[in-house]
Image (cartoon, rainbow, N blue to C red):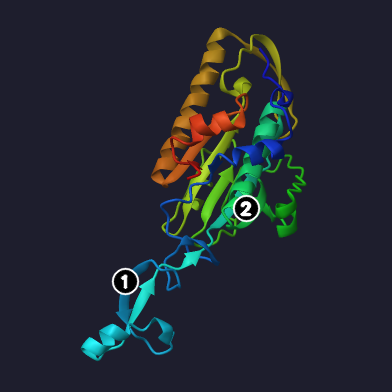
Amino acid sequence: MSPPNAQEHPGDPRTRACEAARHFRLPFRGRVWRGNTGNWSGAGIGSSIDFQDHRPYVAGDDPRYINWQAFARTGAYSMKLYREEVSPRVDVVMDVSASMFHRPAKSARSLELFYFCLESARRTQATVRAWYLCGSECRELLSEAIVAGNLDLPECEGAGNLSLRGVPWRRHALRVLVSDLLDPRGGEEIFPFLGTETASSLVLAPYCREEHAPDWQGNIELIDCETGERRIQFFSADIRKRYRDDYRRHFEMMDDLARHHRTALARLPSEEHLIDALHQHALPPGAVEPWD
């Protein structure tokens, strides 16, 4: 049975992503943010009514936050600290390797997830930056393109293995990677550059039924979607089992790397409706959260 095409889910990818973003969002809750003024609790001195702590006065501090009652008691200046209201920072990287788009359903799911990340950031008033990643080369999207949803995908053929080494991540940002993780090196150039002491991270990984559990039998023409190379491969039940076992071990290793680097990993099948896929596969590992 061949995978269903994108027409099984009505509407275009952006419409479906916007619909899903009304039900789910990126995992902002429970994090301490640093950034521009906004609607989320941060970690600096601010003007919200949520009192956090106090500290000794330092020359140059804003006198509006001096604790005058404490000064009257002790004769020493101290500062009231409040949790400032900030906008979260979100950095989104879209893997544009050919494998992300080699089937209509998977292509649609890849775009849906990218649109979902951008729309989720917009709805939470986050400051967002986004890049296309082709191998190890990243190209930043203009802010106007992000706002307009104008995703002019670059061609990415024969670009080599995926690497996040050169992505200019921001400190204290939520780092999001949209990638199928079909990198043959097993993620050593991916996960160490996602989860850090100063950033939270997650991976949304689309896949299709044909790559996950193929029913290939007999002589099958295989095409390397990254290089275009073609060859004929005979598939018996034994070879098909070996493929499935290798595929399973590859993603078990990805799960281990994600846990080690404190990264939420969610793999989402292309054949399910986006909202259902997020609920079943992204909500449990904490890659998304429901709106309050």
- Direction from residue 29 to residue 51 in the image, left or right: left
**Label annotation for residue 122:** 2
Asked which quadrant contains residue 52, the reply is bottom left
Q: At 56% from the left edge and 13% from the top edge, which residue is drawn?
A: 239
Q: Say if 145 sits above or below 223 in the image.
A: below
Q: At 51% from the left edge and 52% from the top edge, which residue is drawn?
A: 193
Q: Say if 239 sits above or below 123 in the image.
A: above
Q: Is residue 217 visible?
A: yes
| Mark 1 Cα-neighbour bin, 10 Å: few <14, some 14–19, many ≥20 | few
- The answer to which of 214 and 50 lies nearer the viewer is 50
- Image quadrant holding the N terminus, namely top right
- The answer to which of 60 and 1 lies nearer the viewer is 60
Q: Position of residue 241 (x, y in %)?
A: 52, 14
Q: Is residue 268 visible?
A: no
Asked which quadrant contains residue 256, the reply is top left
**Label annotation for residue 212:** none
Residue that carries the numbered disc 1 in the rendered image: 53
At label 1, the amino acid type is Asp
Q: Say if 248 sits above or below 51 in the image.
A: above
Asked which quadrant contains residue 95, the reply is top right
Q: Tell me which numbered mark, 2 or 1, is placed earlier along the sequence.
A: 1
Q: Say if 25 sits above or below 275 in the image.
A: below
Q: Position of residue 246 (x, y in %)?
A: 50, 24
- The answer to which of 237 and 25 lies nearer the viewer is 25
At label 2, the amino acid type is Arg
Provide the secondary structure element on which disc 1 rests.
Answer: strand
Provide the secondary structure element on which disc 2 rests.
Answer: helix
